Image (cartoon, rainbow, N blue to C red):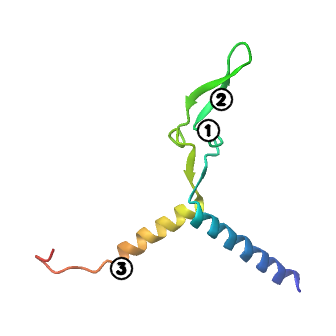
């Protein structure tokens, strides 16, 4: 097997795995708060305590995956472009 064919096969396999992950679980953990929904702080004694809510994920701990975001954008544009025009006075 040539290196180019091996690289194409590997890239295709990784892409298909990512597509299946995006389809099965469209939301992943937030990268900023690591899925906690808030920042961890230490008090003066060194004990961990809850900090502020994460602004990136709005304290949910979840974010939409890049692949799912791209799919949602594509589907929205496709639906808007294939919407059939309706005649005047038709509901």
Q: Residues within 10 Å of mark 2 (few under 14, many from 20)?
A: few
The percent position of residue 88, horizontal first and vertical second, equals 13, 78
The percent position of residue 68, horizontal first and vertical second, equals 55, 63
- Precedes in sequence: disc 2 or disc 3: 2
Dot 2 falls on a residue whose secondary structure is: strand
The percent position of residue 47, horizontal first and vertical second, equals 71, 19
Image vertical order of residue 78 relative to residue 25, above or below: below
Inter-mark Cα distance, 2 to 3: 47 Å
- Is residue 39 rendered to the left or right of residue 4? left
- Give the number of the mark in front: 1 or 3: 1
The percent position of residue 28, horizontal first and vertical second, equals 61, 53
Dot 1 falls on a residue whose secondary structure is: loop
Farthest-out residue, top? 44
Q: Residue at x 88, y 85 (%)?
A: 2
Of the numbered discs in the image, which one, if any, rests on residue 27? Answer: none
Image vertical order of residue 52 relative to residue 44, above or below: below
Q: Residues within 10 Å of mark 3 (few under 14, many from 20)?
A: few
Q: Which residue is mark 3?
A: 82
User: Do the CB atoms of the residues marked 2 and 3 lie less than 8 Å apart?
Assistant: no
Q: Which residue is mark 2?
A: 40
Q: Which residue is mark 1?
A: 36
């Amino acid at each position: 097997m040539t290196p180019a064919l091996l690289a194409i096969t590997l890239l295709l396999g990784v892409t298909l795995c990512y597509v299946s992950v995006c389809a099965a679980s469209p939301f992943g953990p937030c990268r900023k708060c690591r899925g906690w929904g808030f920042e961890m702080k230490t008090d003066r004694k060194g004990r961990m305590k809850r900090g502020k809510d994460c602004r990136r994920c709005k304290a949910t701990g979840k974010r939409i995956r890049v692949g799912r975001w791209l799919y949602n954008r594509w589907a929205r544009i496709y639906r808007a472009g294939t919407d059939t025009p309706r005649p005047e006075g038709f509901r």
